[in-house]
């Protein structure tokens, strides 16, 4: 993965810094000329995958403080865009910082509107960045980073004036309650430590008067002034800077400040550009000056990284699932092998046990067939006693019936003709057909001599009906005492002469 890079832009040139492991390495200086811009284009082509942070330190900047009604959403965006266009007409490099809401009245929201008022200085560099489709994370200025830097080196101060020295001059930034209130870059008049210290004192006095005049700072209040200086020049600044009732100068070791923000490469002079660059990498503020067009490729890069992260997460999940499936398959295979080995062992033991038993007179198949035949014989060894009881109950209901003979047998079909010799034979081994006890009842009617044919038929029907009261019996009439063919008519006045009328019935019951 490519390292992030800092592009420091001032009025004369652009510097490219490579950031890695808390160290900043200068990779190139590109003058604000055609040759410098051409070299910068080649530099961008060689580092297309890098994420670029633009840091501006120029005099051409503006700040405007104002209160506005507290709104949100699209209304807030429209309000901020309208106010920025009013205050900084002609430059798209604007931003707005919320300073909180007022404590009284309508509780309006306080804003600090900021802008880089000379866009022509940045347009050649931004055009090259857009042309090379560079991933621009944003465009910041050193005043926007001053609150974060001051919070690291002096967190206990509620307000202070931070003074830093750079190639463009002396930067003075007023911070109150962790919010940027005003900043100014003044040119430096000399290069000696004494001249720098005198210039810092003079410029601090001027900006204090401005803050009091704008009612940003209360009159008569003491304002701490932190001046970032090299440790070797600290004594000179301490002797030159004279505190007063309104300004308290505190020469601050720039090496200690660098270590406080995690910068390993300590500056060897008073230049604080590397401190602001490190703060920008560690904690970039949300407010910045770049337009949506300048940030478009950075958003695409972040989307690409997000998609790659999601793809990597899905791939990792799939690999974990596949590994678990492989582990489960191996576990099942091991269990299967153990089961097979156990089965073989049990089979050997079983065969050994069988071998130790005395030999049987017959094989297992012959014994199984013999047991089946025995069970069939038990099932077929039924007696006619139950069927005789049923017939006896029917005779109780029909006193005119006299029995002559009962033929009993077993059969597979309750309507089959009785063949006693055949039916008494044992059925085939393993047969599962239903078995029935069948009895053919033959008898005659004990009726008066003058009984007519209708009375004879009624007596037999009554006997059959008495037997059918048992639902398990199947009763069918085989022979009636009277010929009831359709060609002959029954006459109630015709008396039976000669022998007693005879009949026969078949009665069947399921066995078992």
Image (cartoon, rainbow, N blue to C red):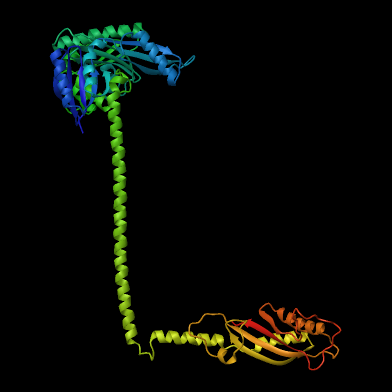
Residue 512 higher or lower than 150, as above or below: below
The quarter holding residue 404 reads bottom right
12 or 267: nearer the viewer: 12
Could you say where residue 270 lies in the image, as x and y percent from the top left? 17, 17
Give me the residue at 49% from left, 15% from top: 106
Vertical arrangement, residue 488 with respect to residue 300, above or below: below
Residue 241 or residue 6, whichever sits in front: 6
Q: The N terminus appears in which quarter of the rendering?
A: top left
3 sits left or right of 493 in the view: left
When the figure is inspected, residue 479 is found, relative to residue 178, above or below; the finding is below
> Residue 154 or 363: which is nearer the viewer?
363
Q: Where residue 341 sits in the image (x, y, percent)?
A: 29, 71
Asked whether residue 216 is in view, the answer is no
Farthest residue in the front direction? 487
Q: Residue at x 32, y 79 (%)?
A: 349
Q: Position of 121 compared to 351: left or right?
A: left
Tell me residue 468's x, y (percent): 71, 79
Which quadrant holds the C terminus? bottom right
């Amino acid at each position: 993965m490519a390292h992030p890079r800092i592009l420091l832009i001032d009025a004369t040139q652009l510097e490219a810094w490579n950031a890695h492991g808390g160290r900043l390495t200068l990779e190139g200086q590109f003058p604000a000329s055609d040759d410098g811009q051409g070299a910068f284009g080649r530099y961008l082509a060689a580092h297309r995958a890098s994420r670029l942070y633009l840091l501006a330190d120029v005099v051409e900047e503006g700040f405007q403080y104002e209160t506005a009604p507290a709104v949100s959403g699209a209304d807030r965006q429209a309000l901020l865009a309208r106010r920025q266009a009013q205050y900084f007409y002609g430059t798209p490099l604007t931003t707005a910082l919320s300073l909180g809401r007022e404590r009284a009245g309508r509780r309006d929201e306080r804003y600090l509107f900021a802008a880089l008022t000379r866009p022509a200085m940045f347009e050649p560099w931004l055009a090259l960045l857009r042309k090379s489709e560079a991933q621009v994370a944003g465009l910041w200025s050193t005043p926007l980073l001053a609150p974060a830097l001051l919070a690291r080196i002096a967190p206990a101060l509620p307000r202070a004036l931070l003074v830093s020295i750079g190639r463009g001059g002396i930067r003075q930034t007023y911070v109150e309650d962790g919010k940027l209130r005003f900043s100014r870059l003044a040119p430096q008049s000399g290069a000696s430590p004494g001249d720098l210290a005198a210039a810092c004192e003079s410029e601090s006095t001027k900006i204090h008067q401005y803050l009091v005049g704008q009612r940003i700072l209360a009159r008569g209040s003491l304002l701490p002034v932190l001046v970032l200086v090299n440790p070797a020049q600290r004594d000179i600044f301490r002797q030159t800077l004279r505190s007063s009732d309104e300004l308290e100068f505190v020469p601050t070791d720039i090496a200690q400040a660098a270590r406080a923000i995690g910068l390993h490469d300590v500056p060897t002079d008073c230049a604080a550009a590397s401190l602001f660059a490190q703060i920008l990498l560690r904690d970039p503020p949300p407010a910045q000056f770049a337009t949506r067009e300048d940030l478009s490729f950075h958003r695409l890069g972040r989307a690409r990284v997000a998609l790659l992260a999601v793809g990597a997460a899905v791939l990792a999940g799939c690999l974990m699932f596949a590994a678990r499936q492989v582990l489960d398959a191996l576990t099942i295979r091991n269990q299967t092998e153990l089961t097979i080995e156990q089965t073989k062992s049990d089979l050997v033991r079983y065969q050994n046990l069988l071998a130790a038993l005395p030999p049987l007179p017959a094989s297992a198949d012959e014994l199984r067939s013999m047991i089946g035949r025995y069970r069939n014989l038990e099932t077929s060894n039924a007696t006619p006693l139950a069927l005789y009881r049923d017939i006896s109950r029917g005779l109780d209901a029909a006193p005119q019936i006299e029995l002559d003979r009962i033929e009993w047998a077993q059969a597979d079909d309750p309507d089959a003709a009785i063949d006693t010799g055949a039916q008494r034979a044992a059925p085939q081994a393993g047969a599962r057909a239903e078995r029935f006890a069948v009895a053919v009842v033959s008898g005659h009617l004990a009726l008066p001599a003058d009984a007519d044919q209708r009375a004879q038929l009624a007596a037999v029907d009554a006997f059959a009906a008495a037997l059918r009261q048992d639902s398990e019996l199947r009763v069918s009439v085989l022979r009636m005492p009277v010929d009831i063919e359709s060609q002959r008519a029954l006459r109630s006045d015709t008396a039976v002469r000669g022998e007693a009328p005879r009949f026969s019935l078949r009665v069947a019951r399921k066995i078992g």
